[in-house]
Amino acid sequence: MSFLLVISLILIITKVMEHLAVKLSLPSVVGSLMVGILLGPAVLGIVQESEGISLLSHIGVILLMFLAGIESDFNRLKKYLKPSVAVAILGIIMPMVMFYLTSLLFGFGSKEGLFISLIFSATSLSITIQVLKELNYVQTREGSVVVGAALLDDIMVVILLNIVMSLLTPGVGLAQVGQLLLATVLFFVGVFLFQRFLLPIILKIYDKVSVPEKNLAFGLALAFLFSFIAETLGMSDIIGAFFAGIMLSQTEVGHEIEGKIEQINTALFAPVFFVSIGLDLSFHGLGKYWYLIIIFSILAVLSKYIGGFFGAKFDGFDRKSAAIIGASMISRGEMALILVSLGLKQAIISESLYALIVLVVIISTVAAPILLKQAVVTKQKSMAKERL
């Protein structure tokens, strides 16, 4: 099928499914995820993953994270750094312990168990952000903790990934692990120095340029540049995009371009990204693993929820707020899919295990926004009652 026709179908059907999802009181992103499952190899087989779809979806997740950075209040992130660290650490420890032990229990080797536990330690901030934005909850106390925790989560998982890959790769030692840690430190030092000293000078010079949409072009260029830098240093590119947004959030340029980028992304790139998640799913040969699919899906939801819930409770959040934070950490999405693809390419996991994990990732990704919306609605109803 023509690539242009595929994109046309995705955009039209996605908006219809998003509408139906909202009508059913579900987050619109659930509709987008279902489109990928229905149109992809899992059901109808009309749409296949392609280089073009992969490129558009990649841009979509970068812009989602860039917008999350622009919309974030950096002072709020600093204010809630302590609970963010607690949520992030427990949100990694719980899945790693639970999935590693469960994997060993069902006959997987220690190498596979370690990699499976790492995959399910990752959190998909992009999907969580989309739901929080729909509910106008990004700028709340809970939203600030979730953004901070998910970012720290991704950073720690990327570091752990490189350490695990080093341990599983013959001939790779502690020197490579040290290089990764050094590169991570250099990235954040570089972000600080650029934002503090170079960015004001660049914006002052750039202000003299008189061409249409110059600020929009500059913002996009900055997002892609820092995504590239983060990826080059061995980190996730979406972390670079987020911090590019953080830098611009404190400038007039950021406020000017936020709405424009959101329109572009919501109309084209983000729908393709969410649909692409469903395109990775195939039911072929999964029948014999039905019990593992159920067990892993339950663990995927519970491990992150428990980690986020108790991480928040330890720092004084009430039960309803802790439930929002716990539900926000459940979604795995693109980070887990990137990790599982890497595991398949490196022959750490088999093709059948790959399909099983992808299905569980999608189940958790669909369940997460539903549980998150329910938690937010419960909190809002409670607050409304208190006002009466």
Image (cartoon, grey):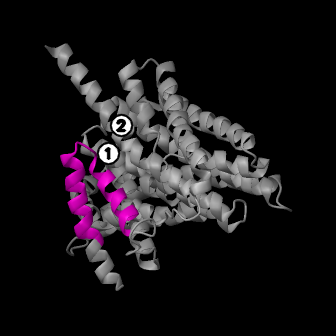
Say what amino acid the circle numbered 1 marks: Val
Residue drawn at x 61%, y 52% as measured from the top left: 289
Mark 1 to mark 2: distance in Å? 8 Å
Would you say 375 lies left or right of 125 here?
left
Say what amino acid the circle numbered 2 marks: Leu
Q: Can residue 332 be seen here?
A: yes
The residue beneath circle 2 is 372
Helix, strand or loop at label 2? It is: helix
Magenta residues span 10-39
Residue drawn at x 43%, y 30% as measured from the top left: 80
Would you say 146 lies left or right of 153 here?
left
Q: Give how far across and how far down residue 382 sits, in percent.
A: 25, 20
Structural crowding at the residue carrying mark 1, measured as other residues with C-alpha within 10 Å and reported as few (<14), some (14–19) or many (≥20): many
Q: Quadrant of residue 285?
A: bottom right
Residue drawn at x 56%, y 48% as measured from the top left: 293
Q: Give how far across and how far down residue 104 sits, in percent.
A: 75, 42
Q: Is residue 337 above or below residue 47?
A: above
**Mark 1 or mark 2, earlier in chain:** 1
Q: Are marks 1 and 2 in contact (CB under 8 Å)?
A: yes
The residue beneath circle 1 is 131
Magenta span main SS: helix
Q: Is residue 183 magenta?
A: no
